[in-house]
Every structure is written in structure tokens, then in C-alpha cells.
Image (tube, rainbow, N blue to C red):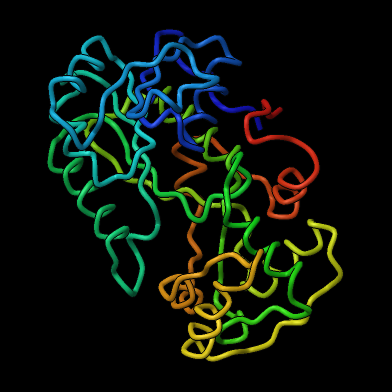
Amino acid sequence: MRPHQPPSHPVHVIGASGRSGRAVCQALALRGTPVVPVIRNPARASGLPTPRIAALNGPTGPLRAALADATHIVCTAHARHIPALLAAAPATARLVCLGSTRKFTLWPDVHGNGVLLGERALMDSGRSGVILHPTMIYGAQGENAVQRLAAVQRLLPFTPLPGGGRALVQPIWQGDVTACILAALNRAWDGPHSLVIAGADAVPYRQFAAMVAAAAGLAPRPTIPVPASLLTVLARLGSYVPGLPRIGPDEIRRLLENKDFDILPMQTTLGVRPIGLAEGLHHTFFALGPDTPRT
């Protein structure tokens, strides 16, 4: 479906040089919306409109100056920086921030705790806006979630997974993340909100792995159940194998927890119906980029 039309006034995009940030900037530009990129490293400004340089983890002054005229702000930087954003942004600016469903993990870590911190800061601020919590994002230029899995399957004749890969996963295509952000920009939020955004299909990880292999043009790989503890050791040894991506013990552990979510609130609130996993993987490997306008 076609995303909501974004506002015609400028949108300040914090983290514009990152994967989701670039996708948002390109999508806004395609729709004729002026973009003000806010980035930390000027060396990463290639392909962006003239950026404003400010760091979320630095002095407040440069960030406040970069956002002084902002009315709509998208923050694709890590949610732990939301307190700094709140301190620097104009009080009337509408905020759309990216969090992560990592906040629901059974094994809290720095990433998930940072998301919780940022969400709490936004909710306590009373400011109008939303923090969107995507599931695993795939299909962005330079993303590595799907590509790393495909790389493992290219090197191994089987797919080793803890618990046999029975836990559910519900990835969301970058194009749908971008559509959700554009829709959120166009909504008049009354106070702070929090919303999960996810793909259309929740599937067992072993099915996800098989779908990735098929989309990448690989022969089917059987799934081999491997205890998480043993897989952690094997992953550590595999880090010395050229071409095999590094997989941390926290990633392996999270393969044992279900990551499926109700997308009705996302569809009702934002009017975005995510595409199916098979279609998203086809786009990722063969067809559309994540910034191609959807119809």
C-alpha cells in the first residue's frame, strides 16, 4: 500500500548517514520533502544534502544549534541518545525515534537497556511523538542480518541452530520501516507514544533460514539442532575461518526466544501493511531497493 504523504516542510534526520537514516532521507527526497541531515562524522556525508554536524554524545550546544529550526525530527540513532535529543530539540518539535524490540529480550544487555532508557525518557517527557520499535530489520543497503545468514549457508552444507530453530522470528523489511516513519511524521501525536513495528510473517527461525537460502539462490540446507553452548564454542572457533561472519554468544542465545508481535496496532495507527517475508527477501536479493516507492 502507499505510505502516508510526508509533510512538505523540512524534516531533520538525526543519524542520516546510517542505514535507516539514509533510507528515510532518500524516501523523503523522492517525495519532494526537504531534508536536513544531522550527522556526527562529516566524512560520511556522501550522497546526502548539506548536513549539519552534531554529536548526540557530545556537548549540547552544537546539537541544539543543528535543531534550532526543527519542527519534525526523525532520530534513527540508538534510542539511548533520546535524553540528549530531548534536551536539545525545540519543545514544539514532533519526534519520531527508532527503538528496538530488543527491549523485550529475556536476556537484558547494553543494547536493550539503552532502548528502555530512551523510551522511558520520551514517555516521561510528555513530548508529542513516538518511538517505533522494529523487529530485525533486513533489506537496507549494507545491512548484515540476512546477508550474514546467507554467508554462513554458502560455506556450510547445513544450518546449525540452537533448539533446532523452532523459536519464532518476524523480520521487517527496511522499506516498511521507512513507510512507518513517514506515516508517523504525518500523524499529529498527542503526547508520547510507543509502538512495535514488525513484518507480516512470524516464522520459525529454521524456516526463515530456508527462505533466505532460497532467495539467495542456494540449494536447501538441512537444519541441524545444536546446543546453544556448543554453538557458542563453534562460533568462536569459526571466527578464524575466512569468509565466515562473526556471531556473538548473545546472538546465539536470542535464537532461543520467540520474537513475534501483533501488527494490528501498527496497521491501525500508521496505516502501513507490511509486505510478506518472501517478497521482502526477493526485493533484498534481486529486485527493489528499500527506498523504492511502494504502490
Q: Is residue 274 above or below residue 229?
A: above
Q: Nearer the viewer, residue 97 or 242?
A: 242
**Foreground of the two, 45 or 203:** 45
The residue lying toward the viewer, choosing from 204 and 239, is 239
* Image coordinates for residue 38, horizontal then vertical, percent: 35, 22
Q: Position of residue 261 (x, y in %)?
A: 48, 60
Q: Quadrant of residue 269?
A: top left
Residue 17 x/y as whole percent:
45, 30
Q: Is residue 270 left or right of residue 128?
A: right
Quarter of the picture holding the C terminus: top right
Residue at figure coordinates x 38%, y 23% from the top left: 42
Instruction: Say above or below: 173 vs 222.
Output: above
Please provide percent x and percent y for residue 86. 17, 31
What residue appears at the point 25 percent right and 16 percent down from the top-left corner? 66
**Is residue 64 depicted above or below 44 in this figure?**
above
Front residue of this view, candidates 249 and 100: 249
**Count of picture labels:** 0
Report whether 148 appears left or right of 72.
Answer: right
In which quadrant is the N terminus drawn?
A: top right
Residue at (48%, 27%) from the top-left corner?
182
Determine which quarter of the picture holds residue 132.
Answer: top left
At a point 62% along the width and 60% down the height, the residue shown is: 148
Looking at the image, residue 262 lies above or below residue 179? below
